[in-house]
Image (tube, helix red, strand yellow):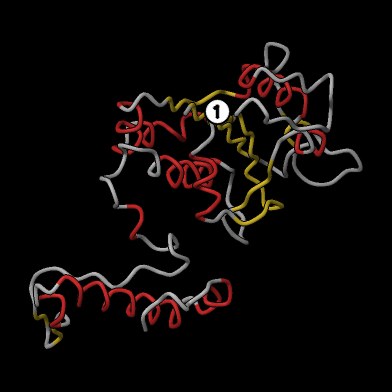
Amino acid sequence: MRLVFLSIAPEFFESYLASHAVQLARRQGHSVEVSDLRDFADGSFRQVSDSPFGGGRGVVLRALPIFRAVEALTGRRLQERPGQPGGADGSLVAALTPTGVPFVQRTAHRYAACDTLVLLCGRFEGIDERALEAVDERISIGDYIVTGGEIPAMAVADAALRLLPGVLKAGSAEEESFETGLLEYPQYTQPAELFGQRVPEVLCSGDHAKVVAWRQAAAVRATARFRPDLLETIDLTSQKR
């Protein structure tokens, strides 16, 4: 996989690019990089934003630098087919924007299967709609506003990268929250008793079958308590209560 952050603030990614997950992905032959949107802008000032038509506060990211960047990173010809996103070449371009659909675990799996994944980071008052019409998807990490799309893009990237073979230990991802549609079961470590609260005895029993059954039931209980909305979208007939 080649993962590219397209941003006007490349310095945001310095610590993330040095993180353990990124280093493991690179050792497996994957590429993680940052592309500065200003490199695709005109003039000595490399202007990437301008005032919105119709008036209003702030500025908007201009479409032309985004078109140029996506063309350079994916080989597409967006300027010849404006408003018609591609993707048949194994590449996918996703814009981080509050107008996007919620990012969920199944989306992370789909992104992890891409040959090239470009994450366009929104800024200011938004992105010129013509550029948004040319990307493949719009995604959001929640119904709230942050300064820019850089932090959301890192969250999306991390969710996808850790699914790549060799980044996590084999089987680790399958037991985590949302992989089965449920939250993960509660975890405990030493000491076995703390302030009068003991670790469930079954987890110390050494009986693997009983541990598995307890964890399945505990995952359902945790989901019902903390995220009951998830139970509306999954089939519990295979889950042991």
Q: Is residue 72 above or below residue 100?
A: above
Q: What element carries label 1?
A: strand
207 or 187: nearer the viewer: 207
> Residue 104 versus residue 67: which sits nearer the camera?
104
Q: Is residue 241 above or below residue 128?
A: below
Q: Image height check: is 137 above or below 191?
A: above
Q: In which quarter of the image is the C terminus?
A: bottom left
Q: How many labels does the image show?
A: 1
Question: Callout 1, which amino acid?
Answer: Thr
Residue labelled with disc 1: 116
| Along the line of sight, the residue nearer the viewer: 65 or 93 | 93
- x, y percent for residue 65: 72, 22
Left/right of residue 103 with respect to residue 50 in the rendered view: left
Q: Which residue lies furthest to the top in this view?
A: 44
Instruction: Estimate the x, y position of residue 185 in percent, counting from the top left.
Output: 32, 71
| Outermost residue toward the right in this view | 54
- Where residue 36 sits, quadrant-wise, is top right
Q: In this view, does 38 lie to the left or right of 30?
A: right
Q: Tell me where residue 204 sits by quadrant.
A: bottom left
Q: Position of residue 38 (x, y in %)?
A: 63, 21
Q: Which residue is drawn at the image coordinates 43% and 74% (left, top)?
A: 238
Q: Kindly identify the residue that appears in the image at 20 percent across and 73 percent down.
A: 209
Rendered view: 74 above or below 201: above
Residue at position x 33%, y 74% in the image? 216
Residue in the image at 50% along x and 55% along y: 105
Taking depth in this image into account, of 81 and 10 the one nearest to the observer is 81
- Give the residue at the far bottom of this rendering: 196
Residue 162 x %, y %: 38, 43
Label 1 environment density (alpha carbons within 10 Å; few <14, some 14–19, many ≥20)? many
